[in-house]
Image: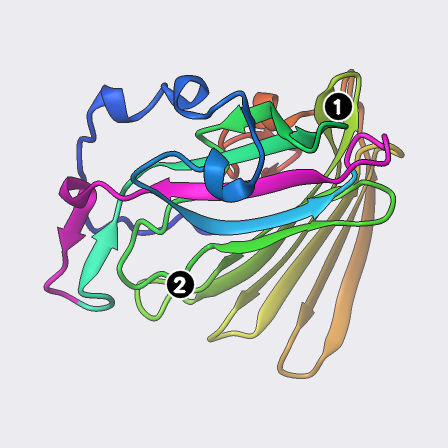
Amino acid sequence: MIKSLTIFTVLISIASFGQSELIMPNKGKTLEKIIPHNWKLLDSTTGDLNKDGISDLVFAIQKTTKENIKLNEGLGTDTIDLNPRILAIYFGTESGAFRKKLVSEDFIILRDSPTMDEPLEGFSINKKGILDINFRFWYSAGSWSMSNHKYRFRFQNNDFALIGYESNEAHRASGETTDYSIDFLTKKMKITKGNFSNNNTESVEWKEFDLEKLLTVKSIKKPFELEFHGIYL
């Protein structure tokens, strides 16, 4: 994944960050009542993550402070929103309320370039309680690369463990593609190379790796900054 070419360098006060646990309420009856004042919803989904038969809530929000919305006179959008984003997971309870389980101020990528599409593609929870968090990177200028990324988490040992990762990367000029598929339970990685111009697979490589313990939302912190066997998760 090619890191975004940030047009602006902005120092956002420390007070804007590091306060997510204080910002988010411990409980709430509805999503609307959980989202703090001056924050907006980016995406949400529901499903049974901890297999107790009660629907849980996963969502991402972004602050709406005007001072962190910067004007752009170059290519792309007229403004760029550098307000902090939060990933939150709330477990449903028998009373009908949702109870805070996880809050991360790092995991949801900012749209930090005016030529960048929204990177957060969304959430989904399957019938087995597996949470997928999906990102997509596409730029109208500044990069020929485009990519899709899927993180797959399972709630176990009172944490959200990364059990799978998939990415599809392509170069719009050359057509070259590289796909990664990692199973952290079997400790195997599949790397497929090809070219979308002819839809042919050029090579498939399998790698095995050692992993003492599964990564988690908390240990990954911010996506695409943790090096793992030649790629950045």
Q: Is residue 1 visible?
A: no
Residue in the image at 69% along x and 33% along y: 96
Q: Which residue is mark 1?
A: 214
**Height in image: 175 above or below 138?**
below
Q: Which mark is residue 56?
A: none
Say which residue appears at 36% left-offset and 51% top-offset.
111
| Among numbered discs 2 and 1, the one appearing first in the sequence | 2
In the orientation shown, which residue stands out farthest toward the bottom? Answer: 198
193 horizontally vs 142: left or right:
right
Q: Is residue 66 above or below residue 212?
A: below
Residue 229 figure quarter? top right
Q: Residue at x 68, y 83 (%)?
A: 198
Q: Which residue is mark 2?
A: 117
Residue 163 visible in this rendered orientation of the protein:
yes
Q: Residue at x 31, y 49 (%)?
A: 112
Q: Quadrant of residue 157?
A: top right
Q: Position of residue 64 (x, y in %)?
A: 27, 44
Q: Amino acid at mark 1?
A: Leu
**In the image, residue 92 lies at what x, y percent?**
70, 32
